[in-house]
Amino acid sequence: EVQLVESGGGLVQPGRSLRLSCAVSGFTFDDYAMHWVRQVPGKGLEWVSSISWNSGSIGYVGSVKGRFTISRDNARNSLYLQMNSLRAEDTAFYYCAASENYADGLEIWGQGTLVTVAS
Amino acid sequence: SYVLTQPPSVSVAPGQTARITCGGNNIGSKNVHWYQQKPGQAPVLVVYDDSDRPSGIPERFSGSNSGNTATLTISRVEAGDEADYFCQVWGSTGGHVFGTGTKVTVL
């Protein structure tokens, strides 16, 4: 069964850090580009970051550049998002997703993990 | 940055056809993908590369793209099609761009 399972969300104070993980099973992880997409409850989808299969291409939305770092460990079938200097506006559900190529549609999604930034 | 505009809502009677538009500058030159999201669930890809369907997606879902507008068409709408729908492209500045989203209500 194809599965993406996010973890690491929770309540964190502004300015602090959090690391999200996404554990992948059921498909060949290193054949796929991986992505983080977030969604404020009740609002639309926002792309956060992407990483190619070999980590050779990486991109971020402007609002997180310099604060968030995406990475992957193909040996562990895992994707990560290190989030530093968190702000209230980073509060959202964070989904990991997979696509065959970096710029393709996101064909596999996890169920999401909620990050709440508040004092 | 590239902007994709969708109508906030579309209402349709069961058995009829729903059309959801996604407007963007020269979007016809890009590959458009569509997602369905039901309450409390993750998005699901229903159309990719303008008009292709992933396995398991009913033929009732189809897409087209030309000029400044892409369209997702849901034929013979069922109650289970009630959801939010988002279009998405790879933006010119290097990143995925999502549309504003459309809530489809089945009357």
Image: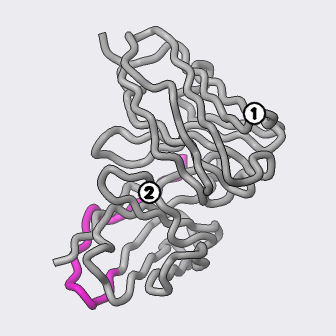
The chain that hosts pointer 2 is B
Point 58% across, 59% down: residue? B89
Q: Secondary structure at mark 2?
A: loop
Q: Is residue B72 above or below residue A15?
A: below
The chain that hosts pointer 1 is A
Instruction: Tell me which segment is drawn in magenta.
Output: B1-18
The amino acid beneath tag 2 is Gly
Residue B9: % across, % down: 25, 66
Q: Is residue A92 above or below residue B33?
A: above
In the rendered structure, the answer to whether residue B75 lies left or right of residue B103 reads right
Residue A101: % across, % down: 74, 56
**Residue A36 is inside the magenta segment:** no
Q: Nearer the viewer, residue B72 or A119?
A: A119
Point 45% across, 66% down: residue? B23
Residue B102: % across, % down: 32, 63
Q: Secondary structure at mark 1?
A: loop
Q: Main secondary structure of the magenta part?
A: loop
Residue hosting label 2: B99
Point 39% across, 64% down: residue? B85
Residue hosting label 1: A76
